[in-house]
Image (cartoon, rainbow, N blue to C red):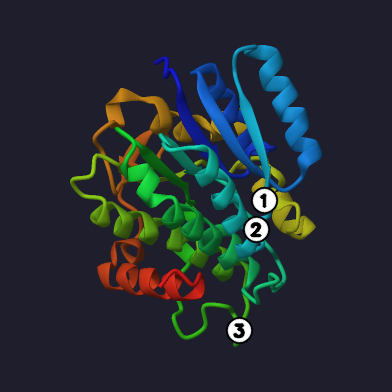
Amino acid sequence: MATENKTAIVTGSTSGIGRETVKALAKADYHLVLPVRNMEKGKQLKKEIEALYSSQQVRLVECDLESLKSVQNFVEVFRAEYTQLHLLINNAGVWFSKRELTEDGFEKNFAINHLSHFLLTKSLLDIIKKTPKARIINVASEAHKFGQINFNDLQSEKSFSSFKAYGQSKLANILFTRKLSKILEGSGVTVNSLHPGVVNTSLFDKMNGLIKSIFKFFMITPEKGAATSIYLALSDEVANKTGLYFKKCKAISPHKNALNTTDAEKLWEISLELTDLN
C-alpha cells in the first residue's frame, strides 16, 4: 500500500477524524499539504508526524474555511508549488447550534461544510484531472437524512434549525459528490462520500449539553471514525468506484433526497455563483 511521492490535501487535519486520517496517510508515504486554521495545532501535528516518519514532509498553509478568500489563498499557494494532487479529502466539519454568518455573509454550517469545500475542489480540479488515479473523498454524514436542500432559504434566513442546517450541509456533500462524479466520468478520477459514524470529536462542542449527552451513548473514537476515510483513500478495492456513499467501508444507498439529480444540478450551479466561479 506504499504510495511514493503522492500528494494529499486533508481539511480539518489537526483534530478528530482528520488527525487520524493524516497519520495513516503519512504512514503510507504521502506528502501532506494541510490547510490549517490554528497554526499552533498544525505545528504540533507536523512535529508528531515527522517524529514518527522521519522522511515524511508536512507542508502547513494557513487557511480558514470560514473565509472563501482564505480558501482561494490556499489554492494559490498550492498551485504555485505543486503540479499534481493525488488525494483530496474534504474532511472538516462544523455543527453550529445557533445561526451565525461567515465574513462572506453565509450561514456557517452551509458555508464551511459545503461551499468552502466546493470552492477548494473546483479550483484544483484541473490539477486533479492531470494526476493519475486521483481520488476525492467527501466526509458527509447520516445526518443528511434529516436535511433537504431549501433553495428558497439556503442561508436559513427565514427559519433556522441546527439539525436542518447541518443536515442540509451534509446532504449537499453527497449531492456534490454525485454531480462531480458525472463530470469526471472517463477522467480516471474517483469521488466518493462517506458517513464516519457518530464520532467523539469537537464537532459537538457547540451543541447544548442535553444533545451532547444523548449523542455520547452512540459515539465512537476518532480512530474508528477515520476508518472509512482511510479505506477510501488507500484501498485498491475502491480504485475504480465513484459516485458512491460509504458507511463502515461498504457502499450503501443514501436517503432518496441525495439521489435527486435535479437538486444536484441546481446546487452545483448555485454553488458556482456563490463562490464566484462562473
User: Which quadrant is the C terminus positioned in?
Assistant: bottom left
Mark 3 surroundings within 10 Å by alpha-carbon count, few (fewer than 14), some (14 through 19), many (20 or more)? few
Q: In this orientation, which residue lies closer to the viewer: 193 or 184?
A: 184
| Residue 101, placed above or below residue 74 | below
- Type of the residue with mark 3: Ser
Identify the residue shown where x is 30% and y is 46%. 244
| Residue 43, placed above or below residue 264 | above
Identify the residue shown where x is 27% and y is 73%. 262
Residue 148: x %, y % from top left: 44, 71
Q: Is residue 13 left or right of residue 88?
A: right
Identify the residue shown where x is 51% and y is 61%. 114
Would you name the residue on which mark 1 appears? 63
Mark 3: secondary structure:
loop
Proximity of marks 2 and 1: CB atoms separated by less than 8 Å: yes
Residue lying at the far front of the rendered structure: 80
Mark 3 or mark 2: whose residue is earlier in sequence: 2
Mark 2: secondary structure:
helix
Q: In this orientation, which residue lies closer to the viewer: 16 or 213?
A: 16
- Rendered image: mark on residue 159: 3
The image shows a total of numbered marks equal to: 3
Mark 2 or mark 1: whose residue is earlier in sequence: 1
Image quarter for residue 99?
bottom right
Mark 1 surroundings within 10 Å by alpha-carbon count, few (fewer than 14), some (14 through 19), many (20 or more)? many
Mark 2 surroundings within 10 Å by alpha-carbon count, few (fewer than 14), some (14 through 19), many (20 or more)? some
Q: Is residue 237 left or right of residue 59?
A: left
Mark 3 or mark 1: whose residue is earlier in sequence: 1
Q: Is residue 273 left or right of residue 10?
A: left
- Rendered image: mark on residue 70: 2
